[in-house]
Image (cartoon, rainbow, N blue to C red):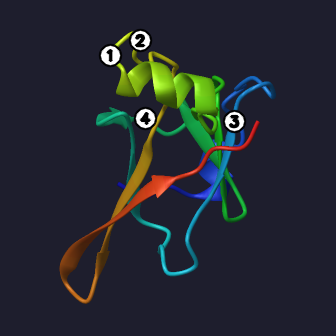
């Protein structure tokens, strides 16, 4: 699958989605996964320079405060906040490489 800036710019994706910077060693040919689900170029995201622009907002769980940690430690409550993970799979020197845990920006 080749994802290119020129092929993905006419998608009509919303500008309200999240952005994810690609690591410097990711080539033009790659696959994108959010929470383990493969994303389709032009439908789910587009490429703008070295940035993935998603059609929806992706959430990252923030730091947990002392009260939340204490309640989890005591077994009173858990943490059920939304936390999306973005992974990019590509080939380098004939081997598949995964850049995992890429952080979305609003």
Give the number of the mark in front: 4 or 2: 2
Instruction: Please tell me whether mark 4 sits on a helix, a strand or a loop.
Output: loop
Q: Measure the alpha-carbon separation of dots 4 and 2.
A: 36 Å
Determine the CA span between mark 3 and mark 2. 29 Å
Q: Which residue is mark 1?
A: 75
Nearer mark to the viewer, of 3 and 4: 3
Q: Is residue 55 above or below residue 8?
A: above
Q: Give residue 46's quadrant in the image.
A: top right
Residue drawn at point x = 59 percent, y = 34 percent: 64
Residue at 57%, 58% (x, y): give it. 4
Q: Nearer the viewer, residue 97 or 45?
A: 97
Residue under numbered circle 2: 77
Q: Position of residue 15 (x, y in %)?
A: 81, 28
User: Which labelled disc corresponds to residue 34?
Assistant: none
> Residue under circle 4?
40
Give the residue at the far top of this rendering. Answer: 76
């Amino acid at each position: 699958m080749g994802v290119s800036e020129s092929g993905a710019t006419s998608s009509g994706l919303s500008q309200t989605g999240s952005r994810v910077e690609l690591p410097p060693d990711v080539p033009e040919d790659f696959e994108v996964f959010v929470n383990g689900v493969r994303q389709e170029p032009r439908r789910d995201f587009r490429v703008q320079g070295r940035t993935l622009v998603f059609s929806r907002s992706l959430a990252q769980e923030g730091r947990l405060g002392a009260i939340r940690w204490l309640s989890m430690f005591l077994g009173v409550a858990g943490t059920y906040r939304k936390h999306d993970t973005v992974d990019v799979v590509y080939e380098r020197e004939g081997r598949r490489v995964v850049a995992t845990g890429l952080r979305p920006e609003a």
